[in-house]
Amino acid sequence: MPAESTMAALLHDWLPRQRWFAGKDRPVTEVSLGTATELLPGDPGLRHLVLDVRQGDVVDHYQVLLGTRRVLPDRLAHAEIGRVGEGHDATHVYDAVHDPELNRALLAGIAEEAAVGPLRFRRAPGTAIDVSAPGTPMSAEQSNTSLVYGETHICKLFRRLSPGPSPDLEINLALSELGCPHVPAVHGWVELATAGTGEPVTLALLSEFLRGGSDGWRLATTSVRDWFAMPMTRGAEPYPGAPTRRPNGSYTAADPGWAGGDFAAEAERLGAATAAVHRDLARAFGVTEVGAEHVREMARAMRRQLDEVAADVPEVAPHAGAIGATFDALAERTEPLALQRVHGDLHLGQAMRTGHGWTLLDFEGEPARTPEERRALGHPLRDVAGMLRSFEYAARFLHADEGQAPPAVALEQERRALAWAERNREAFCRGYAAAGGPDPAAHRVLTRALEFDKAVYEIRYEARNRPSWLTVPLHSLAHLTAR
Ligand SMILES: Nc1ncnc2c1ncn2[C@@H]1O[C@H](COP(=O)(O)OP(=O)(O)O)[C@@H](O)[C@H]1O
Ligand SMILES: O=P(O)(O)O[C@H]1O[C@H](CO)[C@@H](O[C@H]2O[C@H](CO)[C@@H](O)[C@H](O)[C@H]2O)[C@H](O)[C@H]1O
């Protein structure tokens, strides 16, 4: 293994360039090795590292699979992190998730229920694991790294580690036990034993791969592209099926026949699946009724996040008044609220459409929240608000960078984005309420406050993780406050 100081220096520059690195808004001040476990000796070699990454006062822990080879084949050149040693002693160090020869160690370890150093590989009871399939990293837009093995398994490596068992594992196991048809089966997991009595930290989750499925983000954005490509006029006449403005400023729905890939029927089914998952979460983990003081504390927490994000991202300030007024209105609510475990970060990328319907993924909660916040009970409309935000993202992300578009083009783009978002938001809420979820229309202030809270969270998420997307929630915030 290369010297610790050499490794730390290489990783210091490489880490902030990774999509999954969650601290892109601050410089890395120090990288040191927390644990280093040799999984495969020799050449090529595989090591599992937990890195302690300091950024100012905060230390986060990231997981990396490190490959070493004397000769790096061209197919792995893109994964190289650096080189250590000179001449005959030179060794290439690279990101081993891209190497099927090495990443199979994860699957093999789970199949064999291995224990290596502090790493414990667990197989779900009764699961047969095919270890012959090579692992390929997914190209999906995600915060962690997932490896797909053949057509049967998908293994998510949690990159930024949180203490204790992952809520994703905990919830998927509980819902599978209840026979919930809307979650993928758990095939196994990997955990890191901690010293003393501390609970093991979940490092990876192996699930059933939903073969032939498409995630909601891909489907929805395909529909948006179709809709934007549809001509709106024939000569001076509006095209049949074009939305028209209602007296209240909203737009009539587009005719799906004209728009081609309309998504509204899927949005409605997704709403129904979400309500079914909420029902099962309530059965598995229970429901707690809270009173006015708890609701006031919820509103205060929303306000705190708003103040913090507005201090970091100046573009939020012009909207802070309207957002804060909604949080104040929520704080005045006196009726009790029924809270339960929820998904916590529901968006279109967390839902897969398969031949059997919609499956919800990734019950990890929001990656930027503390472990306690992620496990905290919430109102189910929090997930509804997350999905409503996602329809806004899908409707607007294609044109979010086109601030300089001529006014007529910008107006047309906005009309279309609004019409698409409205149509799918309504369909999702209809499906959700019809399947027994609390009706968002009957909880307008709560839903609006939760939607603002999510939008503010997204601005922080994008600034820290994906700065090139920051314009998307900023742009849609303006529309949300005007609603
Ligand atoms: N069980 C699965 N079967 C097929 N694809 C999946 C499965 N789980 C996740 N995916 C794909 O991987 C993407 C990212 O998964 P997710 O669990 O949300 O990762 P992250 O927490 O890193 O964002 C999803 O949007 C989906 O496209
Ligand atoms: O999928 P994760 O649990 O890691 O969630 C985080 O990353 C998401 C992006 O990958 C982010 O979602 C935001 O972008 C989506 C489009 O990529 C959009 O559909 C969502 O509505 C929007 O919130 C999520 O907020 C973040 O926690």
Image: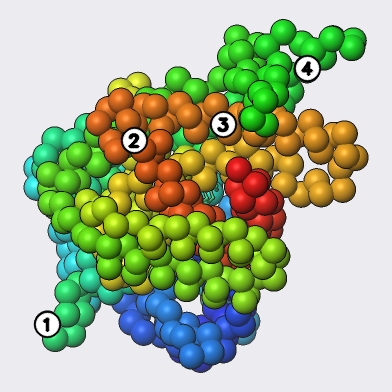
> Taking 413 as reference, is 20 above or below it?
below
Q: Nearer the viewer, mark 4 or mark 1?
A: 4
State yes or no: Cβ of the residue under disc 1 lies below 8 Å from any atom of ligand 1: no
Q: Residues within 10 Å of mark 4 (few under 14, many from 20)?
A: some
Quadrant position of residue 109: bottom left
Measure how far apart labels 4 and 2 are at the Cα level.
35 Å
Give me the disc on residue 231: 4
Give the residue pinned by disc 3: 422
Quadrant position of residue 301: bottom left
Give the residue pinned by disc 2: 439
Q: Amino acid at mark 1?
A: Thr
Name the foreground residue: 126 vs 82: 126
Secondary structure at badge 2 equals: loop
Give me the disc on residue 425: none
Q: Nearer the viewer, mark 1 or mark 3?
A: 3
Measure how far apart labels 1 and 3 are at the Cα level.
51 Å
Q: Nearer the viewer, mark 1 or mark 2?
A: 2
Measure how far apart labels 2 and 3 are at the Cα level.
16 Å
| Badge 1 or badge 2: first in the primary sequence | 1
Q: Residues within 10 Å of mark 3 (few under 14, many from 20)?
A: many
Q: Say left or right for 237 vs 319.
A: right
Measure how far apart labels 1 and 2 are at the Cα level.
44 Å
Q: Residue at x 46, y 35 (%)?
A: 215
| Badge 2 or badge 3: first in the primary sequence | 3
Name the quadrant of the N terminus: bottom left
| Badge 1 or badge 3: first in the primary sequence | 1
Secondary structure at badge 1 equals: loop
Would residue 389 be seen by someone viewing this image from the given angle? yes
Q: Residue at x 85, y 34 (%)?
A: 409
Q: Are marks 4 and 1 in contact (CB under 8 Å)?
A: no
| Badge 4 or badge 1: first in the primary sequence | 1
